[in-house]
Image (cartoon, grey):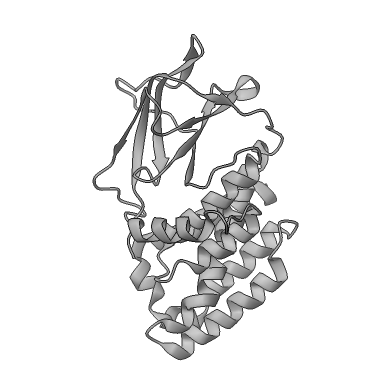
Amino acid sequence: MDEQAYFTAWKSRFNEPHKIVEPTDLALWGGRLCATLEPAFIFCAGYQAAIRATFPELDSDGWLAYAASEDRSEQNPKPGVTVRANQLYGFKTWIAASRFVEDLVLKVGRGIDAQYVSVHSTNAGVTITHNPTPGFLPKLSQGIAEFKGANFSAINDLTRVPGFADSEPYFIYIALLSALSEHASAVADKSSGEIIAAEARKILQAHGDASAKLLELDSDVQKLLASSPFETSGLLSTWGSDARLFSMYSQGIRTRQTG
């Protein structure tokens, strides 16, 4: 499965009349569409759900990207995004699914004075370029957005923005578990795959709503990824360095929740 195939499957599943707006359902169904279990598309499934959970006023049938990163290069950094004459100027340096993203959510400014706006990727004044050789999650296109006088819409409900750091791993874990419960039995070692799928369903049943304790969900997910069936399934060798997606989120969860 490549990004085009996953995007096509996602759009086909979620466009009208089958539109799903509840974020957990988006993550569950997005995970089920990851038939080849690549971390890049598991990430994408959870990421799409997390953005919609954080910015509930957005109504888009396409892929979204939450663009907060700006250039931190020591020499000649690209200028960050600013608003001048009610238009956007500047750069955001990491756009997920850059080849297929339809709407961007931008953080403009820093701290308590930051604004959040949305802009369509095809608006005049928006240019997205793509990294030809991303080193991490290479099946996911990744790019830089430049804004030269682009129109935008303000996002007014910011109450959930502080929770994005926890929402993102939560929904990515839900997408991972959904993908494993649906497709792990198809891995080369079928007996291991069946055990993984059954355990994934068990964890989903215990933690499959947003009120679940993230630290406990993380613990169960990491135990599954470190289990003997997972080691013999061959999935980790297939994932290669992309497997660190899940350890990266685990480290962040533990840092935030245990101090």
**Residue 114, image x, y percentages:** 60, 23
Identify which residue, 230 or 21, lies in the foreground. 21
Residue 256 located left or right of residue 194:
right
Q: Residue at x 46, y 55 (%)?
A: 11
Q: Residue at x 55, y 54 (%)?
A: 16
Q: Work out which quarter of the rendered image holds the N terminus and state it.
A: bottom left
Q: Quadrant of residue 129?
A: top left
Q: Is residue 201 visible?
A: yes
Looking at the image, the residue that sits furthest to the bottom is 191
**Residue 205, image x, y percentages:** 69, 73
Q: Residue at x 47, y 21 (%)?
A: 151
Looking at the image, the residue that sits furthest to the top is 85
Residue 78 located left or right of residue 11:
left
**Residue 178, image x, y percentages:** 56, 69
Identify which residue, 237 or 84, lies in the foreground. 84
Looking at the image, the residue that sits furthest to the right is 211
Q: Is residue 67 visible?
A: no
Residue 200 located left or right of residue 139:
right
Looking at the image, the residue that sits furthest to the front is 17
Image vertical order of residue 124 relative to residue 187, above or below: above
Q: Residue at x 66, y 64 (%)?
A: 217
Image vertical order of residue 118 relative to residue 79, above or below: below
**Residue 139, image x, y percentages:** 33, 56
Image vertical order of residue 256 relative to residue 90, above or below: below
Total numbered labels placed on residues in the image: 0
Q: Quadrant of residue 244?
A: bottom left
